[in-house]
Image: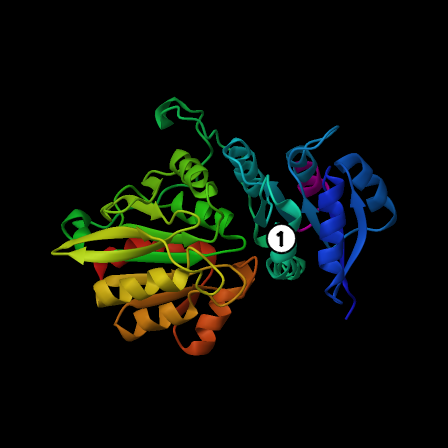
């Protein structure tokens, strides 16, 4: 097999040097160039087009978001954002995901060289997953404002027609719980699913693999696009009809039952399957506290996180779904769940919202 052709675009000479050394460890990745900004990158790309681009956001002459949008409109290419982990850069990175970037890998402001060296495995795996991604499955929407402005005052983004809620749904929603897990390609997939749901739908808990600080901005973006309330989860938040709770980056989230109510708990702890939050951690807790009253859904993402947890939900009597290969950006996590026998049905992405609404009838 031919090695993956990788282009690094970052204005830091240290980052370019260290990343080049990191990827040199992998025989299946070849760094074709390391450019200090997008204009230099475009010059390199005229002679050899990359399979994957690792892209910084804040750079001179042209910022990463402008370059990404130009790229996606003219010749879509898998892009991994490698961005500094600061609150100031969070909104821009979320905009990058909305524009079609596959993943965010964060870099700290201090101890940068050591961090990149210690993150070598994560970076190499991200590039491998991106090289096999199906960009045709990405259908990004226009970027939404992530300010504190109330949703009613924001410009309305175009939304698909919402699904109709079944009659008598409100009387049943306290017993129904939907758990969703996703990773690479999941930010846009979640947007497509959640923005189609009506206000009256089961309570939803979500793990999207995402770094610390980014999940709050991502939740605000989704909240601006959806009829249901979407927010980053906090300990003791109730799982209510018409609400979606997203696990905070850097923390695990579990569901507990208190009488007839479901509440979430946000926890510290070691990574599970190299992830924190982990889909397996969420799904196992749902299997224990909700059993047959739950619906588990595993969507696009690399690796196997969530597969064993979905099996536990299946064995506890929950209905279980997996996104199909054709609509996944990366058919990794769903594939592993199917191999384990954890999946009742495999569905295209656009069929998943109807299943969530239909959970009220089961």
Q: Quadrant of residue 272?
A: bottom left
Overall secondary structure of the magenta section: helix
x, y (%) of residue 153?
A: 38, 22
Q: Is residue 114 above or below residue 273?
A: above
Location of residue 350 (image quadrant): bottom left
* Magenta segment includes 70: yes
Point out the stretch of residues depicted in magenta. Answer: 69-78
Is 121 located above or below residue 193 in the figure? below
Residue 173 is situated, as x and y percent measured from the top left of the image, at: 19, 52
Dot 1 crowding, Cα within 10 Å, few <14, some 14–19, many 20+: many
When the figure is inspected, residue 349 is found, relative to residue 47, above or below; the finding is below
Residue of label 1: 135
Residue that appears at 72% across and 51% down: 18
Residue at x 67% of width, y 48% of height: 113
Given residues 48 and 86, the one toward you in this image is 86
Kindly identify the residue that appears in the image at 27 percent across and 58 percent down.
Answer: 359
For the C terminus, the image quarter is bottom left
Residue at the extreme right of the image, as rendered: 47
Horizontal side, residue 170 vs residue 286: left or right: left
The answer to whether residue 20 shows anywhere in this view is yes
Q: Is residue 76 visible?
A: no
Nearer to me, 81 or 318: 81
């Amino acid at each position: 097999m031919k090695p993956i052709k990788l282009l690094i675009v970052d204005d830091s000479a240290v980052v370019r040097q260290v990343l080049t050394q990191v990827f040199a460890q992998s025989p299946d990745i070849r760094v074709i160039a390391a450019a200090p900004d997008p204009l230099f990158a475009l010059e390199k790309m005229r002679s050899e087009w990359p399979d994957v681009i690792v892209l910084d956001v804040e750079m001179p002459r042209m910022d990463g978001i402008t370059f990404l949008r130009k790229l996606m409109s003219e010749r879509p290419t898998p892009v991994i954002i490698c961005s500094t982990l600061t609150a100031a850069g969070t909104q821009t990175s979320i905009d990058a995901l909305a524009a079609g970037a596959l993943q965010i890998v964060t870099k700290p402001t201090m101890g940068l060289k050591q961090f990149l060296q210690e993150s070598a495995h994560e970076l190499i795996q991200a590039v491998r997953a991106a090289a096999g991604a199906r960009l045709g499955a990405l259908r990004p929407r226009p970027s939404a404002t992530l300010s504190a402005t109330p949703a009613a005052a924001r410009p309305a983004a175009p939304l698909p027609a919402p699904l109709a809620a079944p009659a008598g749904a409100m009387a049943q929603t306290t017993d129904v719980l939907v758990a969703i897990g996703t990773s690479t390609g999941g930010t846009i997939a979640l947007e497509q699913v959640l923005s189609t749901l009506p206000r009256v739908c089961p309570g939803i808990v979500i793990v999207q693999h995402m770094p610390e600080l980014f999940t709050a901005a991502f939740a605000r973006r989704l909240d601006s696009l959806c009829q249901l309330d979407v927010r980053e989860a906090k300990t003791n938040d109730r799982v209510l009809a018409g609400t979606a709770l997203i696990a905070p980056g850097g923390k695990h989230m579990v569901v507990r039952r208190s009488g007839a109510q479901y509440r979430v708990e946000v926890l510290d702890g070691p990574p599970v399957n190299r992830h924190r939050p982990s889909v397996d951690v969420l799904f196992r807790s749902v299997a224990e506290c909700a059993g047959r009253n739950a619906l588990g859904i595993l969507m696009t993402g690399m690796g196997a996180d969530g597969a064993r947890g979905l099996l536990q939900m299946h064995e506890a009597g929950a209905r279980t779904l997996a996104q199909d290969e054709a609509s996944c950006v990366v058919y990794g996590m769903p594939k592993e769940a199917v191999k384990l026998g954890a999946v009742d049905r495999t569905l295209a992405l656009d069929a998943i919202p109807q299943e969530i609404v239909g959970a009220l009838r089961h």
